Amino acid sequence: MKKRKCKKIFGKLNRPRISVFRSNKGIYVQVIDDVNRKTLASSSSREKVFSNYKKTKKELSVEVGKLLGNKLKKLKINKLVFDRGKYLYHGRVKSLADGIREVGLEF
C-alpha cells in the first residue's frame, strides 16, 4: 500500500515534498527534493524554541508548521507536495498542515 502511494508523491526542486514523522512524544517534518536527494529544511517539536512550550500536542504541531513555513519562505519556496506517510490526515498531522498553510504556503 505504501509503495503505491509513494509512486504518486514525488518532490521536485520547484515543488518539494514535505515528509511527516509522528511519534508519541513529538512530530518531525522534513522538506525533501527527491530529484537531487537533498533535505532542504527541517523542523521538529524537539527544537529549543519549544523547550518550555506548555500546550497540547496539536497546538505544538501548529507551531512546528509555522516555524517550517517561515524557513521555507526564506528559501523562496511557495508550493509543496504533502506526504503524510502512514498517518491519517487528522489530529496532529492536520494541525501541522494547517500551520504551514497559515504562513501562506500551498499544497
Image (cartoon, rainbow, N blue to C red):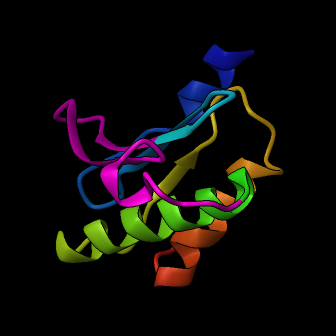
The quarter of the picture where residue 30 lies is top left
Q: Quadrant of the C terminus?
A: bottom right
Please give left or right for residue 95 compared with residue 11 in the image: right
Q: How far across and down, in percent of the image, does residue 31 sit?
A: 35, 47
How many marks on residues? Answer: 0
Between residues 99 and 54, which one lies in front from this camera angle? 54
Please give left or right for residue 38 compared with residue 33 in the image: left
Residue depicted at x 36% and y 58%: 15
Residue 3's place in the image compared with 97, above or below, is above
Q: How far across and down, in percent of the image, does residue 85 sit?
A: 63, 30
| Range of residues picked out in magenta | 29-55
Q: How far across and down, in percent of the image, does residue 55 sit?
A: 68, 62
| Residue 32 lies within the magenta run | yes
Residue 30's place in the image compared with 91, above or below, is above
Residue 16's place in the image compared with 1, above or below, is below
Please give left or right for residue 69 compared with residue 100 in the image: left
Q: Does the rendering let one see residue 107?
A: no
